[in-house]
């Protein structure tokens, strides 16, 4: 992750970067709208592997539903 978009350069994982951003802007990390906004804002600097990692975490955290029942991060 780059330091672009106010994401701390010390944050190495996409999950950590997302959680840091949520804390920085006051967003609820378990809110789908916040996840989609973060994904949109960081689309150019997030790799496919990082996006998959964040999607798996969001599924496990219950932010996204089962594959056929909820919106998914798109690019």
Image (cartoon, rainbow, N blue to C red):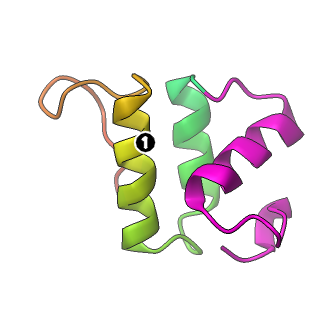
Horizontal side of residue 64 vs 27, given as left or right: left
Q: Nearer the viewer, residue 13 or 27?
A: 13
Quadrant in which residue 57 is drawn: top left
Range shown magenta: 1-29
Q: Residue at x 67, y 68 (%)?
A: 12
Whole-percent x, y for residue 50 in the image: 46, 66
Query: In the displayed structure, would residue 59 be above or below residue 54?
Result: above
Horizontal side of residue 60 vs 20, given as left or right: left
Which quadrant is the C terminus positioned in?
Answer: bottom left
Q: Residue at x 57, y 23 (%)?
A: 30
Q: Residue at x 37, y 71 (%)?
A: 48
Whole-percent x, y for residue 6 in the image: 85, 61
Whole-percent x, y for residue 35 in the image: 55, 38
Whole-percent x, y for residue 60 in the image: 36, 31
Crowd band around label 1 with a 10 angstrom C-alpha radius: few (<14), some (14–19), many (20+)? some
Horizontal side of residue 21 vs 63, given as left or right: right
Q: Is residue 44 magenta?
A: no
Q: Nearer the viewer, residue 57 or 28?
A: 57
Q: Give the residue at mark 1.
A: 57
Q: Is residue 10 magenta?
A: yes
Secondary structure under badge 1? helix
Query: In the displayed structure, would residue 27 be above or below residue 51?
Result: above
Q: Residue at x 28, y 24 (%)?
A: 65
Residue at the farthest left position: 68
Report the number of numbered marks.
1
């Amino acid at each position: 992750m780059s330091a672009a978009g106010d994401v701390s350069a010390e944050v190495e994982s996409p999950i950590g970067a997302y959680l840091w951003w949520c804390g920085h802007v006051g967003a609820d990390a378990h809110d789908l709208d916040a996840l989609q906004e973060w994904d949109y804002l960081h689309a150019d600097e997030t790799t496919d592997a990082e996006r998959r990692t964040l999607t798996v975490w969001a599924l496990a955290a219950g932010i996204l539903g089962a594959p056929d029942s909820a919106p998914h991060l798109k690019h």
